[in-house]
Amino acid sequence: MKLGIDFGTSFSLGATIHLGTKEILLPGGTYGIPSVFYYDDWEGVLIGEAAEDAGQGDQAKNLRREIKLDLNSTFVADGKRFSAKEIVGHILSYVKEVSLQTAQEKMIDERLEGVVISVPAAFTGNEKEFIRAAAEIPTSRGGPGLKVLGFIKEPVAAALAYFDTPLNDDTKILVYDLGGGTCDVAIVKADSRAEEKYTVVDSDMLRIGGKNWDEKLQAYITAELEKQSGISVHGNPAYTEKIKRAAVKAKEDFSVKRGTSYRDKVRAKIEINGRNYSVEITKQIFNELTLELLNKTITMTRALIDKNGGIKIDKLICVGGSSNMPQVIEGLKDAFKGMDIRVYKPETAVALGAAIYAQFCKEHGAGSRVLSDIAPYSYGIRCYEDYDKNPDREIVVNLIFKGDRLPKQSHNYFHTIRDEQTYLTFKVFESTLTKKNCELYEVGDYVMEVELPLPHRPPKYTNVDVTMTLNADGLIEVTADDGKGHLIRGDKHLNF
């Protein structure tokens, strides 16, 4: 069995293909697995619903949410420190555990060959490498970590799930994926006559998602609650967690129909110090609080269409749990009048698409000829422009450019600057710039350092042919030819 995992900011889940049928691997009636981590000395590590249940009241301080948005962090609970990599590893391991248990109950072969993990459309190479390393951590129960076959962009995965029917040639859809932490958009073309049946025309991402809607509501509820109670709730994890849960519940209540229409108002109920408080929120207030967020996602969507020459879109497909909010569809229909807009399996489309893609994947995306994707960034190497004349003048030379078809390979000659140099150190930079030579200040900080040994200690000015490969997953590999026919592979060190 090959598993597709939607590793979400708020919820995660697994899916597979069994006898040609797409299967969501969750216990009956389950929406998803909360991407929530909890630890205390007594319970140990808890994930999902168990973490939610344990992390209430004073124990809210031991609860960690939305780790996907903060991979460069640590978390301390009951004096024990956890890295973001450990937390991600625990969540992915639990998704695997639930998926295998459900597969067994459904009489699906639970021997796991590998997984494909979905990621936001503009996740960096570092973030993907980080998730791969986290997934490969052995489980706390002593089992092996996950074998990651590849990655797929979330909106592209949703497109594969939607297209998994008899294809109309030259069909183009735009996927609008509003999840818990990001809004991802992608234009995907399907053509049954082509070897690569699905082609990503372009994609983009904002780090805006349902979490930001929750925060707007949370701030409003907090202000109203403090007026009613006279109690300052700031800095108290127990109060903050209660208000957060009330905000999420209010948002969900606005997204559920009563009969044929949605609610005009809801109440957020919070208990503080043994007393119950109620905050009324109208639909108008909710929409006004969050209109700026929605408009930013619509602006990005329109820009993607305009950037591609106003490409004709056959359908706009909305996925992601946050697409259930009525204001999202209303806003998109108002912005893109006349376009065929529909919601498609908002909670499960990404996991299903990842499962479809997994069927074509070997390791590192190899063999995945069903899909043609593009590089989300440009990648370059820092070097000296002219070391002898100006040893302080460094630039970044891009070898792979944003928009290049994947996999992409490119090379450039660099030379040693000292006699008997024992290694070359390349700093790899990731940017949205599409010119060949860039100033250091234009590209920001480096994302990866690669050390290439030079065992033959060549003389000064020896040319070294350096090849950079961006594979189907969007992951970097750097190799070199030392001029003597020896292929040198370097060790990668992530700047994370």
Image: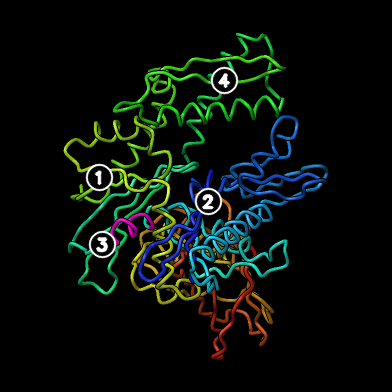
Res 11 seen here: yes
Tell me where the magenta segment starts and ends, as one range: 157-165
- The residue pinned by badge 4 equals 269
Pointer 1 or 2: first along the chain: 2
Residue 253's place in the image compared with 16, above or below, is above
Distance between mark 2 and mark 3 Cα atoms: 25 Å
Numbered mark located on residue 306 in the image: 1
User: Disc 1 or disc 3, which is closer to the eye?
Assistant: 3
Q: Position of residue 219 (x, y in %)?
A: 55, 22
Along the viewing direction, whichever of 476 and 274 lies nearer the viewer: 274
Numbered mark located on residue 165 in the image: 3
Residue 60's place in the image compared with 344, above or below, is above
- The residue pinned by badge 2 equals 12
Distance between mark 4 and mark 1 Cα atoms: 44 Å
Amino acid type at mark 1: Asp
Amino acid type at mark 4: Lys
Distance between mark 4 and mark 3 Cα atoms: 44 Å
| Relative to 313, 34 lies left or right | right
User: Under tag 4, what secondary structure?
Assistant: strand
